[in-house]
Image: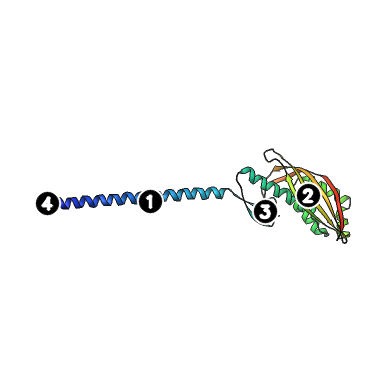
Amino acid sequence: MNKILSMTKDIEKSFKSQNRLTVVAVAGSLLFALVVGVYALTFAEKQREKIYVLDQGKSLLLALQTDAILSKDVEIRDHVTRFHELMFTLSPQKQTIQENLDRAFNLADRSAYEYSQDLAEKGYYSRLVSANISQQMIVDSVKFVSTSYPYQVRTYARQYVVRESTVSQYSFVSTCQLINAGRSDVNPHGLIIEKFKVVENNLVETRKR
């Protein structure tokens, strides 16, 4: 009888021990699953905060955003900067000038084309080619309010005109408005410049090379 009681107690202890192990294993599994789930959600949230913007249309740069407004700000600045670089950074080669202008026209409406046509009619591009003059545009700042649509933009830049013996610097200011459009290979940010206008292009200094 004592043997039976002893065996019964041993069995009960064994069951209790197994139960404790089972509880510990289940709790450990649940804790591990919880940790993995939290990590996965955090990782997914960080991934959603990433956008890719074009650096001068040639390479991809990773930009982290804190919200939708910040991501739109990045795209607006890059779009406007790229447009100005294509329109006003020019080499004294007719084909290169036309290629840059065509790429700029993909980012804007007819107002940009009409501005370039006015320059062409005045012989501006022909003088660049015949006199071997290079031109460089450096955008300093792009001012706008991203919460107001269409986006009203004012761009401040420096324009350098490089001749054989001199370099002239101009202060440059332009205005335009931006509207949303479909994204494409030639317009990765899905924005269109409207009502483009140069409001200042004044000579600052001329120095010898």
User: Label 4 belongs to which residue?
Assistant: 2
Mark before the other along the chain sequence, 1 or 2 = 1
For marks 3 and 1 on the same chain, the one whose residue lies earlier in the sequence: 1
Q: Quadrant of residue 89?
A: bottom right
The picture places residue 28, in percent across and down from the top left corner, at 37, 51
Structural distance between the alpha carbons of marks 3 and 1 = 45 Å
Instruction: Determine the CA span between mark 4 and mark 1.
Output: 40 Å
Which residue was labeled with disc 1? 29
Disc 4 versus disc 3: nearer the observer: 4
Which mark is drawn over residue 54? 3
Q: Position of residue 19 (x, y in %)?
A: 28, 49
- Give the colour scheme shown: rainbow
For the residues labelled 2 and 3, say whether their Cβ atoms are less than 8 Å apart.
no
Q: Does the CB distance between marks 4 and 3 fall below 8 Å?
A: no
x and y percent of residue 25 in the render?
A: 34, 51
- Tell me how far mark 4 sits from mark 3, CA to CA: 85 Å
Closer to the observer: label 4 or label 1?
4
Q: Residues within 10 Å of mark 2 (few under 14, many from 20)?
A: some
Question: Residue flagged by tag 1: what amino acid is it?
Answer: Ser
The kind of residue on which mark 2 rests is Ala
If you read the primary sequence from the N terminus, does the residue marked by circle 4 or circle 3 appear first? 4
Q: CA distance from mark 2 to mark 4?
A: 100 Å
Which label's residue is closer to the chain start, 2 or 3? 3
- Tell me if I can see residue 61 in this picture: yes
Secondary structure under badge 1? Answer: helix
Q: Is residue 103 above or below residue 165?
A: above
